[in-house]
Structures are given as structure tokens and as C-alpha cells.
């Protein structure tokens, strides 16, 4: 949220509609009241200033609300309908997040491109979960789904075309991110029953796994040390503690949050 290229420890508190985050740049805390417990959080950089904006999608009205990081003013706009799943991302590669929704009722994607125009694309079948990320490293987020019934990933890569993979098992939580520093998101998941992470390397489709976390933890992958590599991390609701396995800075445990808080780096992790 502070534009230093490091993922910030951050939560959304549904009761009062509050956002709290710890700035990695100086260790200070920021708090803002924006939204309600029935809204779906959708933080991303909608204004192109290099900082994540606090934002949410309101399913009841199909509206988006964005709190500008520049001056904490807000704007809103309609895009979507009740039942849609917000899937913001930089689909056109211009450095600004595009509001987008996946409509499960018709398995259709609607993308409001920041450069102009709306993209409408059918992709998926009933029960699929969106797993948006840049899987081919071209600077554009790709339309992608995870099919939990068969543990399949279907990825419509904007540069390299369609890719289908079987990776995972029932109950796994998808956590795609660039864990190998090649500029491409790796297909990955967290297995709550064992506290293990599994990563399928985008380079050669070999995989590796490692233990980090325990049953009940919420996966919150991100680049917490700013070295360009995604770090495995979990938020433990039982004691409101964050555990970070940083690729450069090492292990860190951070107490941040209270009972009922939602970790915002988990906003697009599907479970």
C-alpha cells in the first residue's frame, strides 16, 4: 500500500468496515474506515501510482468503490451484478489494475480495460474458481480458473495460449505467485490438512513442496521483502499472528489483527 514494492501486512475488519495495514517502509500503521462487512474486498492499484488502493466490490449493487492512495478521496462506478466475483488485475499490461468480474452463473468474464473498452469472454464451467495471475510473464494478467472437482488448472495465457494442468487435491487452497523469480506466476497451492505448500515451477513444470503453517492457517503469499520473489506466508486467526518465510530476509512473526479480521493479501486466494 505504500509503494515500496513490498507486500504489507494488512487486514480488513468486517464489523466496522475498517482497513488496517502496517507500512513496510517505516513500520507505521494506517487505518481507514471504508466499506462494510457485506462488501467483497478488492485491493489493487487502480490509479497507476504504484501503490495499492483500498477498494471493494458491493455485490448487492454491482458497484466498485476505490479509495485513492494519493489523497484518500474515493470514487465509485458500476461494473458487475449480484453474484459476480471480483477479479481485478492488469489485463492490458498498462500498469493500472482493471476492474473485472467472473460471473459463475454463465462462466463469463467481464473486464473493464483501463485503456478503454470492455472485454467479455466465456471461460470455465460450473464450479470453477478464478485464479488470475500473469502466468506467461508478459506483464498482463491472464484469465484462469481452478477446477476443484478434478484439481485442474486452465489458463488462457495472453501470450502463450491455453494451458491445462492437473495439480492439487480436494481441500487445497490455490496460491499462484512467482515463487521462482522468473517473472511468471507459478501454479501453487497450500494444503491446510498438512500445512504444506506445493509449487509447480513455470520453467519446467517440475514441482517442489515444503512445510510452512498448520491446519487453520490462512495462506497470504506475497513479496514481503521486496526481492521480486513471492514469499510463503500464513495468517493464524487463533492468535492473530502472521508468519512470513521471506526468501531474502528470513523468518518473521508479526502480531497484527484481532479476532474476525480478514487478511487482505488473501483477497484472491481461492479455497
Image (tube, helix red, strand yellow):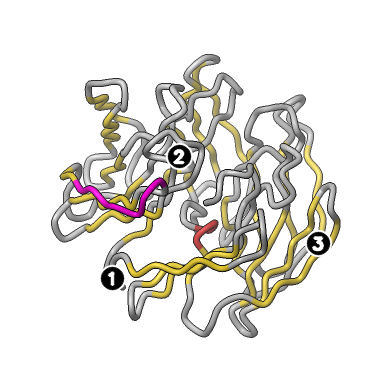
Q: Is residue 82 left or right of residue 33?
A: left
Q: Is residue 65 magenta?
A: no
Query: Is label 3 in a helix, a strand or a loop?
Result: strand
Q: Position of residue 104 (x, y in %)?
A: 28, 47
For residue 217, what is the image quadrant?
bottom right
Please determine whether, in this image, residue 214 is positioned above or below residue 231: below
Compute the Cα span from label 1 to label 3.
Answer: 35 Å
Question: Seen from this angle, which residue lies furthest front?
Answer: 71
Q: Which residue is mark 2?
A: 145
Question: Which of the labelled discs sits on residue 36, or is there none?
Answer: 1
Kindly identify the residue that appears in the image at 63 percent across and 39 percent down.
187
Compute the Cα span from label 3 to label 2.
Answer: 25 Å
Kindly identify the residue that appears in the image at 76 percent across and 40 percent down.
227
Query: Is label 2 in a helix, a strand or a loop?
Result: strand
Query: Is label 1 in a helix, a strand or a loop?
Result: loop
First-in-chain label (3 vs 2): 2
First-in-chain label (2 vs 1): 1
Kindly identify the residue that appears in the image at 57 percent across and 62 percent down.
171
214, 45: nearer the viewer: 45
Compute the Cα span from label 2 to label 1.
Answer: 28 Å
Q: Which residues are magenta?
A: 70-76
First-in-chain label (1 vs 3): 1
Amino acid at each position: 500500500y505504500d509503494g515500496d514494492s513490498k507486500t504489507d501486512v494488512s487486514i480488513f475488519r468486517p464489523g466496522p468496515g475498517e482497513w488496517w495495514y502496517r507500512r513496510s517502509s517505516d513500520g507505521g500503521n494506517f487505518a481507514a474506515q471504508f466499506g462494510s462487512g457485506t462488501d467483497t474486498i478488492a485491493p489493487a492499484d487502480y490509479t497507476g501510482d504504484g501503490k495499492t488502493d483500498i477498494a471493494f466490490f458491493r455485490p448487492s449493487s454491482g458497484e466498485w468503490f476505490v479509495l485513492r492512495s494519493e489523497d484518500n478521496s474515493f470514487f465509485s462506478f458500476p461494473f458487475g451484478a449480484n453474484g459476480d466475483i471480483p477479479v481485478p488485475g492488469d489485463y492490458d499490461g498498462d500498469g493500472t489494475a482493471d476492474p473485472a468480474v467472473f460471473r459463475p452463473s454463465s462462466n463469463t468474464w467481464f473486464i473493464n480495460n483501463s485503456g478503454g473498452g470492455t472485454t467479455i469472454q466465456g471461460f470455465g464451467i460450473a464450479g470453477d474458481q478464478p485464479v488470475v495471475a500473469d502466468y506467461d510473464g508478459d506483464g498482463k494478467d491472464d484469465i484462469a480458473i481452478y477446477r476443484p472437482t478434478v484439481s485442474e488448472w486452465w489458463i488462457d495465457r495472453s501470450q502463450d495460449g491455453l494451458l491445462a494442468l492437473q495439480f492439487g487435491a480436494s481441500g487445497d487452497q490455490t496460491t499462484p505467485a512467482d515463487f521462482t523469480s522468473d517473472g511468471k506466476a507459478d501454479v501453487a497451492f497450500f494444503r491446510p490438512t498438512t500445512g504444506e505448500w506445493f509449487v509447480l515451477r513455470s520453467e519446467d513444470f517440475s514441482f517442489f513442496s515444503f512445510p510452512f503453517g498448520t491446519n487453520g492457517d490462512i495462506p497470504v503469499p506475497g513479496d514481503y521483502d521486496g526481492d521480486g520473489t513471492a514469499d510463503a506466508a500464513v495468517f493464524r486467526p487463533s492468535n492473530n499472528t502472521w508468519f512470513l518465510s521471506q526468501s531474502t530476509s528470513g523468518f518473521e512473526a508479526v502480531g497484527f489483527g484481532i479476532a474476525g479480521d480478514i487478511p487482505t493479501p488473501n483477497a484472491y486466494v481461492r479455497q
